[in-house]
Image (tube, rainbow, N blue to C red):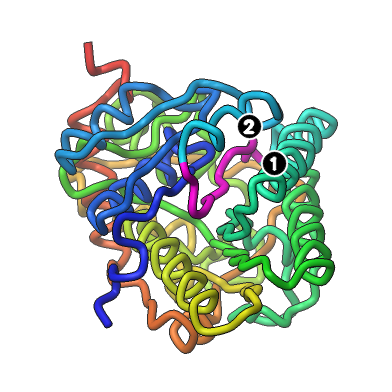
Amino acid sequence: MEATHLINQKNILVTGGAGYIGTHTLVELLSSGCQVVVIDNLSNASRKALRRVEMITGKTVTFIKGDVRDRTLLRSAFQGYEIDAVIHFAGLKSVNESVEDPLNYYDNNVTGSLALIEVMSEFGCKTLVFSSSAAVYGDPANVPVNERESLSPTTPYASSKLMVENILRHVHVSDPAWSIAILRYFNPVGAHVSGLIGEAPNGMPSNLMPYVSQVAHGKYQKLKVYGDDYDTPDGTGVRDFIHVSDLASGHTAALEKLFCSSLSTDQGEILTLNLGTGRGYSVLEVIDAFQKASGRLIEYEVVERRPGDAAKSYADTSLAFDLLGWTAKHDINRMCQDSWRWQSMNPEGFESDK
């Protein structure tokens, strides 16, 4: 069976589909023959990103501007389109911001998910891929981290993701017809090889790669490295960085698996899977790789650790390979090359597209 056979011609609703991971997943879905409907409130995204997706794929994206907490808007989307499945990205994602404004994070991430699940149930749409996070593991006792590791989120952002995971597990217990994939991904970086879509954060980046990119391009003078006294080879935090295009292909692979399960049995399935490379890179290793990719010197200063940051976290990805046949293909050099191409072509993000 070809990898795209089961999702060909399916109508997929993608919440938060105008965002960084969402747009790259749209490219995968459209290239697999899906029809896509995007709901996004554009709070941390751009309508221009969807036009870039259309340029890459030559396909049309149906866009509905609105908030996933709006049940009326959700119902109109399900009434207007025969939605076969949902990929749920919509939510807030800044760890630091969640510490400063936890109620907003619980409202967006948990209340929004509840509204979506309820409306899906109303319309008999019970196939869902949920965007979770490796942050649910907190500071893991063991690395590489497998899906059986204890869960101890240390921030409101991570707690909100785990809350939704638990809601979905309870929903599946109450109604086994639901087919659900919970994807815990590690640190998405990189950009589409075309340089047309990539990560475009509002204001000062909170994630390492766009921060490094903008320092390399000259927008910021130097990079802040949060702590160099961790129990790691060079003292800086170690993370599993995964190319966003690899991450996107993991979503289509999960969707395939869910459709396959629904066809082969009367009951659905619930999957909980890590998506990463299985390799950790320190902050200093990333800086070195980016300097090679860009040909630019990246100045940095070491500052105090951020609360909630783990010393090291990288994935055991064997379950995703066993169940989905999926594995990440791109290494840190390719991640940095693609990030630099995106930054160079779009120094102001999508605002460069005048």
Magenta extent: 82-94
Amino acid at pointer 2: Arg
Tell me which residue sits at (27%, 49%) in the image.
30
Res 30 seen here: yes
Q: Is residue 21 above or below residue 132?
A: above
Which residue is found at the position 29% from the left and 70% from the top? 5
Amino acid at the residue labelled 1: Val
- Residue pictured at 64% horizontal, 46% vertical: 123
How dense is the environment of label 1, judged by Cα within 10 Å: few (below 14), some, or many (20 and up)? Answer: some
Between the C-alphas of marks 1 and 2, the distance is 6 Å
Q: Secondary structure at mark 2?
A: helix
- Does residue 353 sit above or below 245 in this rendering? above
Residues 222 and 332: in front is 332
Q: Where in the figure is residue 10, as x and y percent of width and height?
A: 37, 55
Mark 1, residue position: 119
Q: Nearer the viewer, residue 238 or 182?
A: 182
Q: Earlier in the sequence, mark 1 or mark 2?
A: 2
149 vs 41, left or right, is right
Instruction: Name the main secondary structure of what is drawn in magenta.
Output: loop
Residue 85 in the magenta stretch? The answer is: yes
Q: Position of residue 284 (x, y in %)?
A: 44, 57
Which residue, given by chain and number where applicable, does mark 2 sit on? 75
Residue 329's x, y, as percent? 29, 72
Please tell me whether residue 12 is drawn above or below residue 183 in the rendered image: above
Quadrant of residue 48 within the rendered picture: top left
Q: Are marks 1 and 2 in contact (CB under 8 Å)?
A: yes
Closer-to-camera residue (48/341): 48
Q: Tell me if residue 12 is in the magenta stretch.
A: no
Secondary structure beneath disc 1?
helix
Q: Quadrant of the C terminus?
A: top left
Left or right, 18 with respect to 104, comes to left
